Structure formats: C-alpha cells, structure tokens
C-alpha cells in the first residue's frame, strides 16, 4: 500500500533534521541530545535497517558477527530512549532552503530549523557490459552482504573487481569464506591510493601466498552468462579480461570506488565540488544547513585544501563538530588526516598523511623476505614528518600518526637518526614531546 504524503511541521522547539543514519548522522544526533535535552531530533535513513556500520559488513560475511553486530548502537530502544525520532527507509529527493524543507520519496516533506546532510556515498558502477547480471554485486549494504553470502560458498569461483581500500577489506572476507578468489585491479599495484609500489607489491605477494590470485594492471572488459547447460554449470558467469583471457565465476563483486551522494541537493543551490563544500564549522553555503561524513568536502589536515575523506573516524568527528555548531556552540574542525589501516589475512599495512611526499627527504627500510617496510616522508623545508607508510609493523604505529599530526620540527639530530633508522620513530616522537 502506498503511504499517504506526510508533512511534519516545526513547532516551538528547535527541530534538528539529520539525513543519513551512518556514523556521522548517529554521532550528530546523540551529541545534539547531550547539548539540547529538549530539542526535537529526527534521524532519516534511506535503508530499512537499523543504523549500522558498513565497515562491519566483512565481519558479517565471515561469520564473526550476526546482523545485529553491525548496528552502530546495540542497546534496546536506543534512539527511542534518547528521544530521537528514527525514520528508516526514507530516501531524500530534494531540498528547498527557502521553505526550509526536504522532500522524501512518496511525496513526503519534512520541515527543519537546522539540517545536517550526512548523505554518505555510493559505490561506483563502471560502464561495463554485464554489470547488471544476476550474481554481480557491490558490497556496500546489508542487502548486498546477504546476496554475496548466498553465492560465495566454499569452493565457488568469485571474481573481485578492484583492490582499493574497501576492495581489500572485502578480499579478506571472501578469502576466509574459502572460495576460489581472483582479484582484478586495473592499477599497477594493490591499494594504489594508500601504498607505493614497494608496499603494494608486498601485499600482492602476501595475498598470493595465501591462495588468492591477484591480477594487477588488468581490467574487466565484460561479464556474460556462461553458455553451458544449467545442469552442467558450476559457474553461472564468465568474466572477460583486458588481455582477452576468461575467468569463470559464480559471483562477481564490484569494488571500484565510491562517489558522494549529492544528487538530491544539486538543484538547491548548495556549493558542490566532489562533495558538499563545508567550512571549518561544517556549514554549507546555505543558511542553517550543515554537512558531514562521506558527502562533506572539507579541510584536509596536512594541505589545508578541501577534500572528501570517506573514512569512519572522520565521519564521526564531522558529526560531533556539526552538532556543536548546529546548537550554537562554536567549535572549529582542524581538518581530517588521511589515514588507512588494513589487516589483510594477517598482514598489517597502514599509511598516514602525505605518504607520497612533497619533494623532501625520505627514509626507508625494506625487508622483502620478512614482509616489512617503513617509509617516512619529510617536508621539503626540512625536519617535519608529513607522511608515513608501514607494512608488517604493529608496534607503536599510533605514534606515526601523532608525529605527523603534531607537525613538530624534530631538529637536525633526530632527523638524522630517523634517516639512518626509521624504526626509531617512537623515540623521535617521545623526544619531541619534551621540547
């Protein structure tokens, strides 16, 4: 039955409307409740599920948790107890900043006093023939996970398109399901936006040693149904690669990057770039409209430029800062630090800040046999660490992040120590604390 259009009116209380029930939206709603006990808060989500973490989906696929384990808040009646009105399964269709209303599917409208757009991102679907066939899935939602789990059974052939950050997380989940897994990455290495050639090469060799076939510098040309009798077919799909070779597949998982969800606000006049442009208070160009999370394009900690950082820790920080400013408590955001940490079949890899460098000195330690690598990048002006990569190193890696975020000058002596032996970064970090 089609729902009748609903119009929710503002009353004398300030009405905070948050569109997006991911980490940014949930954190914002909870923070507003802390700051304004009497305010009206409505949290709108476009999926029929309880608010959940996408980063928990791989753990669901390997059976470490059930679906409830993906929920962002696991207490009974959490949102009801906080007086937060949860509206699941409602997709935003438009924004009228003059009338101060948003439109929702089905003709519903919702009035706001303060609006937070935590619209998130969606997976890219390249223009490849056959991407709409049964058995081809993205791995972004709980619905996706259910379909993948049904098809990716032990012994089945699975092709994973993309070995970026998200793709490599999915890779581990698929491999642990004991499938025959082939990864197809068009870049020259795995996780090219996180790792250089040395680190990406190490990760590839590690995965191959664990039984995963990894094809870099390769793309998928098309996907088609297998032309064999159904009674004889173990695999339902064939995947044609850029080199002309063919892979059989029961399941194809597409992980080709993400894009911020800005379509529903494009006609509102809001400032857009790769996402919704925000200032250091998470304000957009429209009055009383804020943005946070994977849709927000805001300050990068290292460069000061506006970037979209689609990581959960940034989303939660955005949500908290937005909440403070939505409630009239001035709080500035100092920027998101680009950082990624992966645990891939037992190999830890991480990168922080400007890991590619900017023309300054670079300290490296390479142990190909032991799968260990450490790279420190210094600013072109001298003795400030601006970026780092590590493979196979788990001790004190948080100090790498701290060293970069501090932007401290190390001094000539400490820098020379790190250039000779970058594993001494912890000692260098401690020394700077006492300056």
Image (cartoon, rainbow, N blue to C red):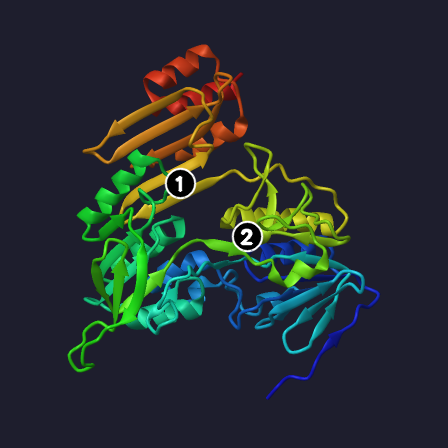
Which of the marked residues, 1 or 2, is nearer the chain's N terminus? 1
One can see residue 80 in this view: no
Give the left or right position of residue 355, taking residue 83 as reference: left
Could you say where residue 34 lies in the image, as x and y percent from the top left? Answer: 68, 54
- Local SS, label 1: loop
- Residue pointed to by mark 2: 294
Write down the quadrant of residue 424 in the picture: top left
Using the image as rendered, state which of residue 196 and residue 40 is in the foreground. 196
Considering every residue shown, the one lying at the far top of the view is 413
Q: How many marks?
A: 2
Give the left or right position of residue 254, taking residue 321 as reference: left
For mark 2, does the 10 Å Cα neighbourhood hold few (<14), some (14 to 19), or many (20 or more) residues?
A: many
Could you say where residue 225 lies in the image, as x and y percent from the top left? Answer: 27, 73
Considering every residue shown, the one lying at the far left of the view is 232
Give the left or right position of residue 343, taking residue 379 as reference: left
- Local SS, label 2: helix
The residue located at (57%, 38%) in the rendering is: 300
* Mark 1 and mark 2: Cα distance apart in space: 18 Å
- Residue pointed to by mark 1: 194
Quarter holding the N terminus is: bottom right
For mark 1, does the 10 Å Cα neighbourhood hold few (<14), some (14 to 19), or many (20 or more) residues?
A: many
Q: Are marks 1 and 2 in contact (CB under 8 Å)?
A: no
235 in relation to 380, above or below: below
Could you say where residue 208 lies in the image, as x and y percent from the top left? Answer: 20, 48
Give the left or right position of residue 139, taking residue 318 as reference: left
Could you say where residue 204 lies in the image, as x and y percent from the top left? Answer: 25, 44
One can see residue 324 in this view: yes
Using the image as rendered, state which of residue 285 and residue 391 is in the foreground. 285
187 in relation to 233, above or below: above
């Amino acid at each position: 039955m089609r729902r009748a259009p609903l119009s929710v009116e503002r009353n004398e209380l300030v009405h905070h409307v948050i569109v997006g029930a991911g980490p940014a939206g949930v954190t914002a709603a909870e923070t507003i409740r802390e700051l304004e006990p009497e305010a009206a808060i409505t949290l709108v989500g476009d999926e029929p599920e309880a608010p959940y973490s996408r980063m928990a989906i791989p753990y669901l696929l390997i059976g470490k948790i059930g679906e409830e384990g993906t929920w962002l808040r696991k207490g009974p009646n959490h949102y009801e107890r906080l007086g937060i009105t949860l509206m699941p399964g409602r997709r935003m269709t438009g924004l009228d900043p003059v009338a101060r209303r948003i439109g929702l599917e089905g003709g519903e409208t919702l009035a706001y006093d303060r609006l937070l757009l935590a619209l998130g991102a969606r997976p890219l679907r390249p223009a490849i023939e056959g991407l709409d066939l049964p058995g081809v899935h993205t791995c972004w939602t709980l619905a996706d996970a259910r379909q993948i789990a049904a098809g990716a059974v032990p012994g089945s052939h699975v092709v994973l398109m993309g070995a970026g950050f998200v793709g490599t997380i999915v890779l581990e989940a698929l491999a642990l399901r004991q499938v025959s897994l082939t990864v197809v990455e068009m870049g020259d290495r795995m996780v090219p936006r996180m790792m250089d050639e040395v680190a990406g090469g190490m990760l590839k060799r590690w995965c191959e040693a664990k039984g995963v076939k990894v094809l870099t510098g390769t793309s998928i040309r098309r996907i088609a149904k297998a032309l064999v009798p159904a009674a004889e077919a173990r695999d339902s799909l064939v995947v044609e690669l850029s080199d002309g070779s063919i892979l059989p597949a029961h399941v194809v998982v597409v992980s080709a990057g993400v894009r911020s969800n800005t379509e529903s606000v494009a006609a509102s006049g809001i400032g857009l770039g790769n996402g919704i442009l925000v200032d250091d208070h998470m304000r957009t160009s429209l009055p009383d409209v804020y943005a946070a999370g994977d849709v927000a394009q805001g300050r990068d900690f290292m460069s000061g430029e506006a970037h979209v950082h689609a990581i959960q820790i940034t989303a939660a920080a955005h949500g908290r800062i937005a909440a403070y400013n939505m409630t009239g408590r001035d709080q500035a955001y100092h920027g998101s630090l680009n950082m990624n940490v992966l645990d891939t079949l037992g190999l830890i890899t991480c990168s922080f800040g400007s890991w590619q460098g900017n023309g300054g000195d670079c300290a490296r330690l390479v142990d190909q046999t032991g799968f260990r690598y450490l790279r420190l990048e210094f600013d072109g002006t001298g003795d400030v660490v601006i970026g780092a990569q590590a493979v196979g190193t788990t001790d004190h890696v948080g100090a790498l992040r701290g060293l970069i975020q501090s932007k401290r000058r190390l001094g000539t002596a400490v820098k020379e120590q790190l250039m000779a032996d970058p594993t001494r970064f912890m000692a260098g970090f401690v020394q700077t604390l006492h300056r």
